[in-house]
Amino acid sequence: MRTPLTLAVAQPLCVPHEVAANVAAHAAAVRAADARVVLFPELSLTGYDLDAPSLDVADARLAPLVEACADTGALALAGAPVGDGAGSAYIGVLAVDGAGVRVAYRKMFLGGVEPRRFVAGGGPAVVAVDGWRLGLAVCRDTGVREHARRTMALGVDVYAAGVLEAPTDAAVPEARARRVAADHGVWVATASFAGPSGSRYPQTAGGSGVWRPDGTPVLRTGAGPGEVGRATLR
């Protein structure tokens, strides 16, 4: 029988462009969460400034987060702009554990002005943890039914998304999470930015959460930065 999975959704305070400070906040959230998986918001390591440089997986500034994951046995899923070595940039999800850092997913469905800087990712992605399969998503992905369908085709137990919304759109992540759960019968987790996130978002909505496969909520965080919510998936 598959063991329960402890999953945390974190919304650390972000200092735009200050990767070292944001890594420290991520590492603190991992240590506080006491969870096997810790999910972070879209572009959580840089903030939503679309001119922030791409972050290399070998960047020495990521070392404190790798160390925190090594010490706790956690997998962190953090947001950052990433490159491909050929000049293209993507909105990425970094998978960080005690062994290091890798790019686990690139956002497929870009929104707003994002295409001015970023290229759409080529396909869905799944990370496996202790027998659980987590399908990855970033913000607008969650509002496109095609994304969920293609991700579920890979075999998914949890749909995990890092998102960012303005306070006026605070209800959007939950509505999308409930729809994915209803359509596909999977757990859904969203980590939503809280506090300021770059010049385009002087305030963000927070309200991270986890929903059961029937769409009912297990937990919801508040709107304040620094909050971490933890759930056990069975």
Image: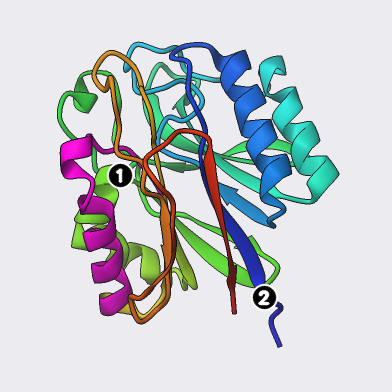
Q: Earlier in the sequence, mark 1 or mark 2?
A: 2
Residue at coordinates 68% horizontally, 22% vertically from top-left?
Answer: 58
**Mark 1 residue type:** Cys
Residue 178's place in the image compared with 13, above or below, is below
Which residue in the structure is indicated by mark 1?
A: 139
Residue 75 locus on image (x, y percent): 67, 49
Residue at coordinates 26% horizontally, 38% vertically from top-left?
Answer: 165
Q: Quadrant of the N terminus?
A: bottom right
Colouring used for the render: rainbow
The magenta region covers 160-182
Nearest the viewer among 194 and 44 is: 194
Residue 192's place in the image compared with 46, above or below, is below
Nearest the viewer among 59 and 211 is: 211
**Mark 2 residue type:** Pro
Which residue in the structure is indicated by mark 2?
A: 4
Specify whether residue 225 is painted magenta.
no
Horizontal side, residue 10 vs residue 143: left or right: right
Residue 16's place in the image compared with 169, above or below, is above
- The quadrant holding residue 52 is top left
Residue 35's place in the image compared with 214, above or below, is above
Dot 1 alpha-carbon crowd within 10 angstroms: few under 14, some 14 to 19, many 20 or more: many
Q: Quadrant of the C terminus?
A: bottom right
Magenta stretch, overall SS: helix
Query: Which secondary structure lies at badge 2?
Result: loop
Residue at coordinates 27% horizontally, 53% vertically from top-left?
Answer: 173
Q: Please say whether residue 57 is visible from this viewpoint.
A: no
Q: Please say whether residue 34 is visible from this viewpoint.
A: yes
Circles 1 and 2, Cβ within 8 Å, touching? The answer is no
**Mark 1 or mark 2: which is in front?**
2
Query: Which secondary structure lies at badge 1?
Result: helix
Residue 212 locus on image (x, y percent): 42, 75
